Image (cartoon, coloured by chain):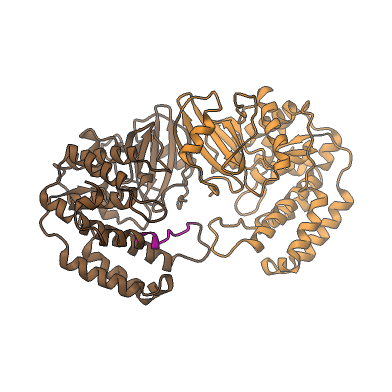
Chain colours: A brown, B orange
Amino acid sequence: MAVYTQISDDELIAFLATYDIGDLVSYAGIAEGVENSNFLLRTTTGTFILTLYEKRVDANDLPFFIGLMDHLARHGLSCPTPVVDRDGVALRALAGRPAAIVTFLDGVWPRRITPPHCRELGGALADLHLAGADFTMQRPNNLSLSGWSPLLTASGLAADQVYHGLYNLLSDELRHLARHWPADLPVGVIHADLFQDNVFFLGDKISGVIDFYFACTDFLAYDLAICLNAWCFESDGSLNVTKSRALINAYQKRRPLTPAERAALPVLARGAALRFLLTRLYDWLNHPEGAFVKPKDPLEYLARLRVHQRITSTAGYGA
Amino acid sequence: MAVYTQISDDELIAFLATYDIGDLVSYAGIAEGVENSNFLLRTTTGTFILTLYEKRVDANDLPFFIGLMDHLARHGLSCPTPVVDRDGVALRALAGRPAAIVTFLDGVWPRRITPPHCRELGGALADLHLAGADFTMQRPNNLSLSGWSPLLTASGLAADQVYHGLYNLLSDELRHLARHWPADLPVGVIHADLFQDNVFFLGDKISGVIDFYFACTDFLAYDLAICLNAWCFESDGSLNVTKSRALINAYQKRRPLTPAERAALPVLARGAALRFLLTRLYDWLNHPEGAFVKPKDPLEYLARLRVHQRITSTAGYGA
């Protein structure tokens, strides 16, 4: 539920007057996304999203995010395209916040994931990696291996309030991952948060990918590992191998994995499970009492982690 | 901030299949309104609002609200028009809630009110009363005189935590209003909550009126008294007579007030100030700690009440 900053009609109309996108017809705050304030704008020429970037986003990262969406859109990916003002500037300020207007994408995200969704996703993820291949800006992934230990320390022994023995279990997993994390896989720009609410479908085809605010430079195959976690598990915590096979095979049709990437996939998937387990655990332990946004259950990712721990090759994912 | 009930793409697509409004293109929860869950729908034929009615709305009142919007729209008022399904039914159920689709209105509500806004509002309010004249359904106003005493009792002496002596002050005011409340003024359907966020403008003209979920059968002039409170005061609590004159005179151009209505306007305005003071006071004292929706300051309406207490005729409002 996210409209943290209110804007007035006067300031919005004055702001839009510096763009060539017509006159304001309506606007409404959107109750999706938890990081920024998002408004759906309708003008006499079309529909747009206006985002005001809130404190949880580092303003220094915004040129990377805006530049990436612009690059990917120019390379044929269906994603929000930054709209520039009459001076050619996309990253602006409004109501005391960094602000940008992007194009609106049609489509709805699937609440109930099926194998065909996963097949579509695999192709779109490969397209994203290929389209990003010549994007020259870099942003380190501060939620990869080096970022997990401080996150676990921040939760500390309070982790055991959520699940008995969780702190030791996660410490052991961290040590394992530190020893086995790959060092030399193909690197590029990854989405890093390609959950189902960030992938729009029209009918059974993907119409667009949104929310690039965790995008960074990291192993391409780690993005696939995140999608395995986000798309291929059932609500009882079991891996659906039909879905993971569809995802990986569709990805490989457009960008075949190298032997090293295939070998590393189980450990990357463990890392991805740990990453979401740790951030959810932190939010679970630190959300304000009575806050409107309900934190997500960290233990869903403990179940996923345990599945990946028992897998030793991509065959375990049916691929 | 209001999306209390989530809906899935599957159930929404199945729901829309029973209407003749095209295929779903996108939908997003809207972060406005505090009573119900609202979604902005785009289909291949247009833009709509889907409302799921939450517990604070009495389901028995919904036929009145839906019927009223339909009636007013048919009589030329620009307001959300209920959309019927293929069986001709507007009030449906979705995700375990009563639900209705209405047309989307272009326009933005004015954050900074000027006298021309008040002039436009006066005309629109009279239009609403005239269009509603032959609406046959009735709904008592449970937030009028007989409803105020229970509200004050519910807040009780805790009122004095908000402002020293408030409970006695409000008890005295209630006694005064009970003695002087008019008994025989023109009655009809009133909006009863025509605050600025419920009135849309395109440029300097009203493009529509929304949110009929407090509408009821009561003195028409009481609606004008509510608008006096909601639109004609400055943030320092002072009455802006230019605004109140513009409001009342524009109203009278289309529906002249009777002598009895003119005489009763100051007491009706006191009642309207007390009504919003009491509901805000109750919400102020009873909102959950840390809740996302910040309650509105009840004392804004104490200042308005005191202004009305010193006014003895419509001349005090410049009209």
Quadrant location of residue B111?
top right
Residue at the bottom extreme, as displayed: A157
Residue lying at 60% horizontally and 52% vertically, measured from the top left: B235
The percent coordinates of residue B173 (x first, y second) are 81, 57
- Which of the two residues, A158 or B206, is positioned nearer the viewer here? A158
Residue lying at 41% horizontally and 37% vertically, measured from the top left: A108
**Left or right of A266: which side holds A8?**
right
**Left or right of B42: which side holds B142?**
right
- Which of the two residues, A114 or A48, is positioned nearer the viewer here? A114
Q: Is residue B135 visible?
A: yes
Q: Can residue B250 be seen in this view?
A: no
The percent coordinates of residue A68 (x first, y second) are 23, 43
Q: Quadrant of the C terminus of chain B?
A: top right
**Left or right of A91: which side holds B270?**
right
Quadrant location of residue A209?
top left
The correct choice, above or below, for A216 with respect to A48 in the image is below
Magenta highlight range: A293-301
Residue lying at 35% horizontally and 72% vertically, measured from the top left: A166
**Left or right of A126: which side holds A194?**
right
Dominant secondary-structure state across the stretch colored magenta = loop
Taking the magenta stretch, the answer to whether it contains residue B69 is no
- Which of the two residues, A215 or B175, is positioned nearer the viewer here? A215
Looking at the rendered structure, the number of numbered marks drawn on it comes to: 0
The percent coordinates of residue A101 (x first, y second) are 35, 40
The percent coordinates of residue A246 (x first, y second) are 27, 41
- Which of the two residues, B282 or B16, is positioned nearer the viewer here? B16
Residue lying at 39% horizontally and 51% vertically, measured from the top left: A234
